[in-house]
Image (tube, helix red, strand yellow):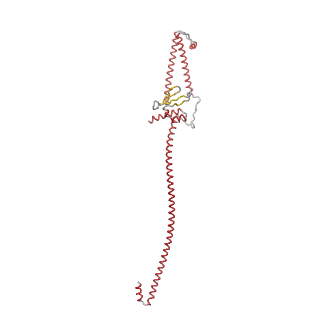
Amino acid sequence: MRAILDSYDSELSPSEHTPQLTCRLREAEEMLQKVHGHNAEMEAHVSKALEEAGMQKQRAELLTSEVKLLKSQMGTSDQSLSINNETINSLRLKIEELESERGRLEEANKVLEMKLERLCLSGSYDPAEVKVVHLSINPAQKAQKAEKQRRKEEVQQLQDECSKLRELVNVLEGGSPVPVKLEAAGTIQSSSQEVSELKKQVESAELKNQRLREVFQKKIHEFRTACYMLTGYRIDITTENQYRLTSMYAEHKDDNLLFKSTSPSGGKLQLLETSFSLTLHDFIDLHLHHQNSIPAFLSAVTLDLFSRQTFT
């Protein structure tokens, strides 16, 4: 290009060099201005790029600090998460313990409700809600005692009369004089007719005693049957002051209870040990030791035996 320009310039005259140079100079100046403008623009771009680079660097530093902060927060969150897991595990164990405790309390509540139902069926009551008034003189007991006393006196009187009549008959049959103690029986002549009348009276008295014994035995049998049907226990007197109770719901014929009277009047009874009583520790502890109630104990045993026969 330079050779072409030189050849082109050599062909021109000196007068023609000046406008060409001026044009080229002007073009060069324009080119230079363009270059300067381009440089300024490039410098502006560079400065702008530097500014953006600085901003990006600041942003990168900010992001780095945020990342570090997040990492530290993640570490603390991991620790808190582990702590939360331990807390959750402990709470689960506590819930399981509470569930087992609740089940145990429900079972205990059912047992207590059954015991309360048995107590209600056996006639127990709450002293705070129910007030029981006991008569100092029970009319029924008083009438029963009076009737027993009257029968006892009547029997004793009849026995005395029979014994006197027997002695009199023996004396009269033997022909001996009548003793003074037998004179109160009546003025007796030693005739055979009077002796026969006395024999008839003796036979009548013996017949009356026999009838009374039959009536007493019948009444005693009725009373024992009524007690058996009402209480569910057959009561037998084995020895003096000792009573054997056999429940109608007993599973075996040898299942019985023995009670012994510890006072002359029979007001206190004591349970004796038997093979059947050894199986009733819970009832003995509850009703005899704590509540001191023999009727409640017998009722509880009756309900237990009845429930066994019902459910089986």
Residue 108 position (above or below residue 206): below
Split into 4 quadrants, where in the image is the N terminus? bottom left
Residue 199 position (above or below residue 227): above
Q: Position of residue 189 (x, y in %)?
A: 55, 10
Residue 231 position (above or below residue 159): below
Q: Position of residue 117 (x, y in %)?
A: 51, 37
Judging depth in this view, the residue of 165 and 62 nearest the camera is 62
Q: Position of residue 33 (x, y in %)?
A: 48, 80
Residue placed farthest to the right in the image?
136
How many dots with numbers? 0
Residue 30 position (above or below residue 216): below
Judging depth in this view, the residue of 288 and 191 nearest the camera is 288
Judging depth in this view, the residue of 67 and 31 nearest the camera is 67
Split into 4 quadrants, where in the image is the C terminus? top left
Q: Position of residue 94 (x, y in %)?
A: 51, 48
Is 247 on the left or on the right of 130, as rendered? Answer: left
Judging depth in this view, the residue of 163 and 262 nearest the camera is 262
